[in-house]
Image (cartoon, grey):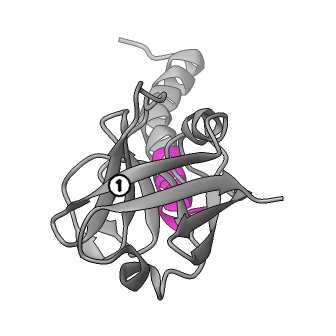
């Protein structure tokens, strides 16, 4: 059987397609891991500053620009009763779901992370720990060094508002 040049080029192209796809996949993963460019659920660039008030303590936080945070911002300001869970987080069940198409398992949650769980639970973390649960990353407290002290050991009233 005689193979012409066109067949050879087609065969080479077919061999290159999976290699190119793998390279682009690895580049996308590297960018996502660096926090520079990620899917809708993870950090691209923090664009909106909010204030979180616990008692008489104010904390500045940065929210990522994604569909979920835009839906949350539309509800601000809001004062909610956050419930203590597991000695590392406070959560509040929103009255209705926020868009949460791209939840992922962050593996490591850091003190000060603000996330959405299951589309309707707004979560404010005050300890760093590993997890296997899926969340949508919303943002983080800029300086959470006093967050655990301010939130205290039990349930707490928290106000979220957009900063001027």
The outermost residue toward the top is 1
Q: Which x, y percent locates residue 163?
A: 76, 59
* Residue at image location 47% in from the left, 87% down from the top: 146
Of residue 89 and residue 103, the one placed in the foreground of this image is 89
Name the residue beneath numbered marker 1.
82
Horizontal side of residue 96 vs 47, given as left or right: left
Of residue 60 and residue 77, the one placed in the foreground of this image is 77
Span highlighted in magenta in the image: 24-35
Tell whether position 26 is magenta: yes
* Residue at image location 43% in from the left, 80% down from the top: 150
Horizontal side of residue 155 vs 99, given as left or right: left
Q: Which x, y percent locates residue 104?
A: 34, 46
Q: Which x, y percent locates residue 139?
A: 55, 58
| Picture quadrant of residue 88 | bottom left
Circle 1 residues within 10 Å: few <14, some 14–19, many ≥20: many
Quarter containing the C terminus: bottom right
Q: Compared to 101, does 47 lie above or below?
A: below
Of residue 108 and residue 2, the one placed in the foreground of this image is 108
Dominant secondary structure (helix, strand or loop) of the stretch shown in magenta: helix
Of residue 45 and residue 95, the one placed in the foreground of this image is 95
Tell whether position 27 is magenta: yes
Q: Compared to 116, does 164 lie above or below?
A: below
Q: Compared to 75, does 1 lie above or below?
A: above
């Amino acid at each position: 059987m005689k193979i012409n040049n066109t067949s050879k080029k087609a065969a080479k192209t077919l061999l290159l397609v999976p290699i190119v796809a793998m390279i682009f996949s690895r580049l996308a993963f590297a960018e996502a891991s660096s926090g520079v460019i990620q899917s809708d659920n993870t950090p691209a660039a923090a664009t909106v500053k909010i204030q979180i008030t616990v008692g008489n303590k104010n904390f500045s936080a940065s929210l990522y620009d994604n569909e979920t945070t835009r839906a949350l911002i539309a509800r601000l300001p809001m004062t909610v009763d956050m419930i203590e869970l597991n000695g590392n987080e406070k959560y509040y069940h929103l009255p209705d779901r926020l868009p949460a198409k791209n939840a992922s398992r962050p593996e490591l949650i850091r003190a000060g992370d603000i996330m959405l769980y299951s589309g309707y639970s707004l979560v404010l973390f005050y300890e760093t720990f590993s997890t296997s649960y899926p969340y949508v990353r919303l943002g983080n407290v800029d300086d959470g060094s006093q967050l655990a002290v301010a939130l205290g050991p039990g349930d707490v009233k928290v106000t979220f508002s957009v900063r001027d």
